Image (tube, helix red, strand yellow):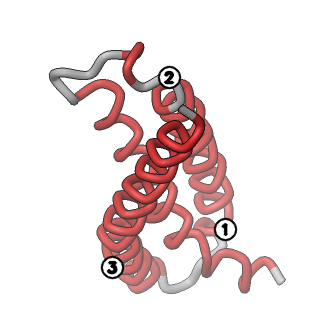
């Protein structure tokens, strides 16, 4: 059972690592970012980025424990690294598109309400 669960660890690293990166970029790296103009984005980015970081650290701890009992360590490291990189870059595009879709929806709702 544990052997089957550990196969999703690299996907969790990639998907939630990319979410954390997107949140970090939107909050801390945008030069003209004003919190008053983005009342929903700022708290969401801080909370989602923090949860992503905590989740990645927890999964990393479980992965280290299961890695100690592994026989083919080099093969597992290379496989997990490749899956993590692919899911990370795929996740960046998915999260960016989802971010844009939600932003447009929020702008549309505010336009309809006014």
Mark 2 neighbour class, 10 Å CA radius: few under 14, some 14 to 19, many 20 or more: few
Could you say where residue 91 lies in the image, as x and y percent from the top left?
A: 40, 67
Task: Please tell me which of labels 1 and 3 falls first in the chain.
Answer: 1
The reply, left or right, for residue 66 in relation to residue 83 is right
What is the quadrant of residue 37 in the picture? top left
Instruction: For marks 1 and 3, give the CA distance.
Output: 18 Å
Q: Which residue is mark 1?
A: 66
Q: Which residue is mark 3?
A: 82
The foreground one among 74 and 95 is 95
CB under 8 Å between discs 1 and 3: no
The reply, left or right, for residue 66 in relation to residue 9 is right
Task: Please tell me which of labels 2 and 1 falls first in the chain.
Answer: 2
- SS state under label 1: helix
What is the quadrant of residue 100 in the picture? bottom left
Q: Which residue is mark 2?
A: 39
Task: Please tell me which of labels 2 and 3 falls first in the chain.
Answer: 2
Instruction: For marks 2 and 1, give the CA distance.
Output: 42 Å
């Amino acid at each position: 059972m544990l052997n089957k669960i550990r196969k999703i660890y690299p996907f969790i690293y990639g998907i939630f690592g990319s979410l954390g990166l997107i949140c970090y970029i939107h909050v801390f790296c945008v030069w003209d970012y004003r919190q008053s103009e983005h009342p929903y984005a700022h708290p969401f980015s801080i909370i989602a980025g923090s949860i992503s970081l905590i989740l990645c650290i927890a999964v990393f701890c479980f992965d280290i424990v299961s890695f100690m009992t592994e026989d083919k360590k080099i093969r597992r490291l290379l496989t997990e690294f490749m899956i993590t990189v692919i899911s990370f870059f795929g996740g960046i595009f998915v999260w960016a598109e989802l971010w844009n879709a939600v932003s447009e929806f929020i702008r549309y709702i505010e336009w309809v309400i006014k």
